[in-house]
Amino acid sequence: MSDNPYRAPTPPAPPAASAPAAPAVAAWSDPSLDAPPPPRRQVEARLVWRGIFTMLGAHALTMLAGLLAGLVFGQRTGSGPMSDGGHAYVFVVVGVFAQFILGIVALVTGIGGIIGKDGGKGSGILIGWVAGVPASLIVGIVITATLANA
């Protein structure tokens, strides 16, 4: 009798049970990479406060830099490269640019600190930057109004 071509083939036999083998390790792998990461350092309140006050001080420095630039480079005459604005115009331009640069620096160092081992200082930097933005805005409006009326 010949085999029927329309019949399903017989299933293969189940694999034989084998003893558990040690996991295969490549020659280049480092066993220390399989170890769990070391525990993170606990967030200390003093580092958070240090980051907050660092950023509030940086906001104050950007306002001071804008004020000094406005007083030094602002013009009262109608001619020259800055003929459109006086002290207030220069203060606003320099202050906005300085705050923009401060924001980039705060985001990079804050996120880098949180991802790295120093989460307290990184989160303090971000908190201080966020808290300093509205304060700088209010102080900037007051300084701009004062310079414009002077």
Image (cartoon, rainbow, N blue to C red):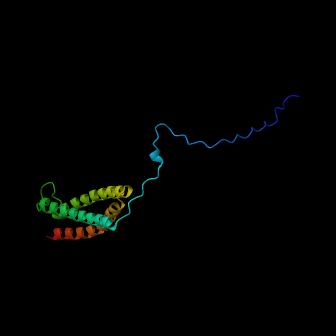
Which residue appears farthest toward the left when viewing the image? 77
Residue 110's image quarter?
bottom left
Q: Is residue 122 left or right of residue 83?
A: right
Residue positioned 47% across, 50% down in the render: 35
Residue 1's image quarter?
top right
Q: Is residue 111 left or right of residue 17?
A: left
Q: Is residue 39 left or right of residue 96?
A: right
On the question of residue 86 being in view, the answer is no
Q: Position of residue 4 (x, y in %)?
A: 84, 32
Quarter containing the C terminus: bottom left
Q: Position of residue 102 (x, y in %)?
A: 27, 58
Residue positioned 27% across, 56% down in the render: 101
Q: Position of residue 36 (x, y in %)?
A: 46, 52
Residue positioned 12% across, 60% down in the render: 72
Q: How many marks?
A: 0
Which residue appears farthest toward the front when viewing the image? 19
Residue 84's image quarter?
bottom left
Q: Nearer the viewer, residue 145 or 27?
A: 27
On the question of residue 95 being in view, the answer is yes
Residue positioned 76% across, 39% down in the render: 11
Q: Position of residue 112 (x, y in %)?
A: 35, 55
Q: Nearer the viewer, residue 26 or 64?
A: 26
Q: Is the residue 31 above or below the residue 135 in the image? A: above
Which residue appears farthest toward the right when viewing the image? 1
Q: Nearer the viewer, residue 50 or 137?
A: 50
Q: Is the residue 89 above or below the residue 138 in the image? A: above
